[in-house]
Amino acid sequence: MKRLLKLGVVTSVLLVGAATPAYAQDALTIEDLALGATVLYLMVATVLVFIMHAGFAMLEAGLTRTKNAANIIGKNLMTISVGILVYYAIGWGLMYGEQVAGLFGTDNFLLLGDGYAPDATLEIDFAFQAMFAATAATIVSGAVAERMRFGAYIAVAAVMTGLIYPLVGAWTWGGGWIDALGFADFAGSTIVHMTGGVAALVGAAVLGPRIGKYDRDTGAPRAIPGHSMPLVALGTLLLFFGWFGFNGGSVLELDGVLIGKVVVTTALAGAAGGVMAGVVTRLRNGRWDVAMTANGILAGLVGITAGADAVSNGMAVLVGLLAGVIVVFSVVSFDRLRIDDPVGAISVHGTCGVLGTLWVGLAATDGGLFFGGGLSLLTAQVLGILGVAAWVGLSSALLFGSLAAAGRLRVSEEEEIEGLDVHEHGFPGYPELAGGTSYSSNT
């Protein structure tokens, strides 16, 4: 041990000595250290949000059937890949470039311009925001699972990250017309989650339900169980883990007090949502529904995302409890409307995104209706929700409608029955379960 300690001391002295000339020539300033710390903080947050895409992949795979597992994974891989490139080329500039009439940006495409946050760098700002853009797109993936053409989904992901989501961002976080109303959405209950949820609703409606989902005679919904609850649990926990970067990173600066507050409200709401969804399904069905408990956790997280910085801990618990109830009945309601959403994405992100945004207008300690703030903030929230829903609904309807009209949206009946893995990708996600058959791209 003594020899190791001596070796460590000698090595440290040599390293310091070697570095001394560099420091003498170019000494670090307080500003340099502050910038480095902020970039490091945002890098960690970026990585955490990136991990959420692994969570989405596992959750969606677990809630769908084995014959479509590779297809689900492929869509999530392409979402993050296409999303980053398209947002880099187009989306970032539309969202944060110099605006025209509060509607869209006109520069900063391909990162050729100055950043919008003087306390960080253009590059780390882009990296963090690119993860959000891809998140809005990947929400659509689960709702259209098991019957949509792979190429059509790639087109949807590109338009979502290059146009639909960036314009929503330009109007809000980019300082556009919705922001001018006084609209408040801290980390994206509406901007990210409801945007994805509305597009998912349109996509599922245009596609139609999966074969066998509804009884031909009565129209009653039939359960089509997912193939792996362990994957559902893993995906949910990865999403919960990443959400601390999603919300915590949205502080965008090293404000320790606010970061701590945001992390706690996020944890409380997610936990409350999971508990309540589990209890509600136990009371309704006499069973503890694991998949719905998972969706309850995610619903609570979506519900707190808009106001993680603005509500008290008690109100964070309350919105989580409400989200846990609402998500259950929202899933049931869409099922009765014959909107087939295999993973509950519309309810988790769309319905609870609306809840979370309205919750700011009701429960924000500064300006919320419950705390004597009057109706001004709540009115701004409602107008923001309506504006975003109208744009996303119309633009995604045009997108999905065009693909359907061109005959490029939905796979054939034979492909759907046999599974998208073999027909779209040439190989099953679980070869052993397919009888060990050898597949190729020509199969």
Image (tube, rainbow, N blue to C red):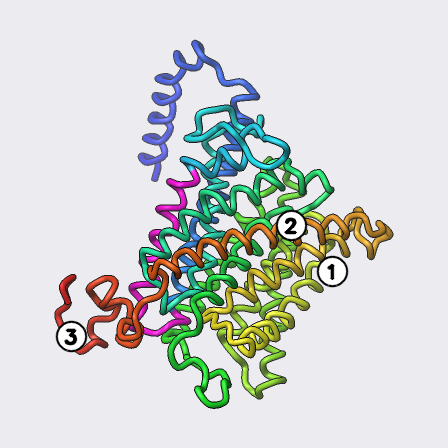
Against 286, is 381 above or below?
Answer: above
Query: Disc 1 to disc 3, how far (Cα)?
Result: 54 Å
* Residue at the extreme bottom of the image, as rendered: 217
Amino acid on which disc 1 is placed? Gly
Closer to the chain start, of discs 2 and 1, is 1
Q: Looking at the magenta stretch, what is its main secondary structure?
A: helix
**On-image quarter of the N terminus:** top left
Closer to the chain start, of discs 1 and 3, is 1
Looking at the rendering, the stretch of residues picked out in magenta corresponds to 62-87
Amino acid on which disc 3 is placed? Gly
* Residue at the extreme top of the image, as rendered: 25
Helix, strand or loop at disc 3? Answer: loop
Pointer 2 with pointer 1, Cβ within 8 A: no
Q: Which residue is mark 3?
A: 436
Q: Which residue is mark 1?
A: 314
Report which quarter residue 230 is drawn in: bottom left
Query: Disc 2 to disc 1, how far (Cα)?
Result: 30 Å
Residue 162 is left or right of residue 353, and the answer is left
Helix, strand or loop at disc 2? Answer: helix
Q: Is residue 72 magenta?
A: yes
Q: Of residues 373 and 196, which is closer to you in this image? A: 196
- Which residue shows up at 48% across the image and 24% down it? 113
Amino acid on which disc 2 is placed? Gly
Report which quarter residue 354 is drawn in: bottom right
Report which quarter residue 399 is drawn in: bottom left
Crowd tier of the residue under label 3, counting other residues whose Cα lies within 10 Å: few below 14, some 14–19, many 20 or above: few
Q: Which residue is mark 2?
A: 387
Q: Residue 201's spot in the image, x, y percent?
A: 52, 63
